[in-house]
Amino acid sequence: MSGAAVAGIVVGAVLVIGVLAVVGGIVAYGLATRPDRFAVREMRLADVDRYIEKTASFAIVLECTTPLSRGEVWSRLTQVRYLSSLPLLAGPTWTDAADRSEPVVGAGRTMSGTILSVAQRVIGVIPGERLTLAGTGISVPWAIADFAGRFTIVDGPRPRTVTVRWEIAGSPRWVGWLPWRWCVPIARPVLAFVLRHILRLKPFRRPTDHPGVPGGRRGNSDFG
């Protein structure tokens, strides 16, 4: 086989892979508009500790200390769409209220990305202290079996500080037996950045009522 033929095969393969990647991206983009399109296995609050500590294929725990007040931190976790001020992301958004002042067990929320979106449900809440969520759906089929997250706020090591503990765990629907927890060092810098973003000193702009909007509908102005 001549060198020209080999080069032609390589170029053809690259083009095919590129086309498949573009088509896959377009499909994923379309699916991402429905975070609850494909259901995942929901879990009980009583199962979360064991899931994070042992049974989840992937689990990570992050902590960050901040001079923000406990009330401000809790408000950000429950009322601010903190992902919306990051590129290609949106949410968290409560599915049953434009602006929920206090989450309740059973309330749903979504978080969206360009090619992946997820839906969650509150399964445990201690106001000002702990928020526990379990996954209920995902936009991509056959990807995730189940997932959960938990925020815990405790007193910080120094006066007038609090420490936020963020626990995230999940298991893929396939190849869950692989050592996914080995990926923690790769995921940690990204998720730590998100946590620091949530706890940044610069205030987030909150949703505000817009005069003249029928029904007092709230606008999404928390992108700053």
Image (tube, rainbow, N blue to C red):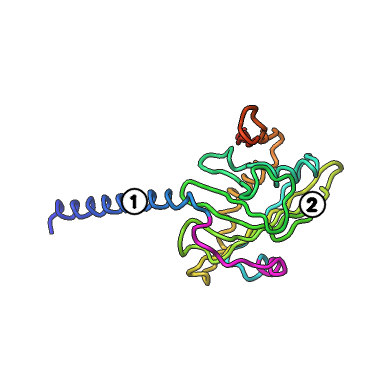
Residue 201 percent across, percent down from the top left: 72, 35
Disc 2 and disc 1 in contact, CB within 8 angstroms: no
Res. 110 in view? yes
Q: Which mark is residue 138?
A: none
Amino acid on which the number 2 mark rests in the picture = Pro
Say which label, 2 or 1, has the lower sequence index: 1
Q: Which residues are magenta?
A: 36-51
Q: Is residue 128 above or below residue 140?
A: above
Q: Residue at x 64, y 43 (%)?
A: 98
Q: Position of residue 17 (x, y in %)?
A: 30, 53
- Tell me the mark number nearer the camera, choosing from 2 and 1: 2
Q: CA distance from mark 2 to mark 1?
A: 44 Å
Give left or right: position of 94 versus 74: left
Q: Residue 23: give its label.
A: 1
Neighbours of disc 1 within 10 Å: few (<14), some (14-19), many (20+): few
Q: x and y percent of residue 85 in the render?
A: 59, 37
Q: How many marks?
A: 2
Q: Write down the residue under mark 2.
A: 127
Q: Look at 55% across and 64% down and name the residue there.
A: 40
Question: Is any part of residue 60 visible from this angle?
Answer: no
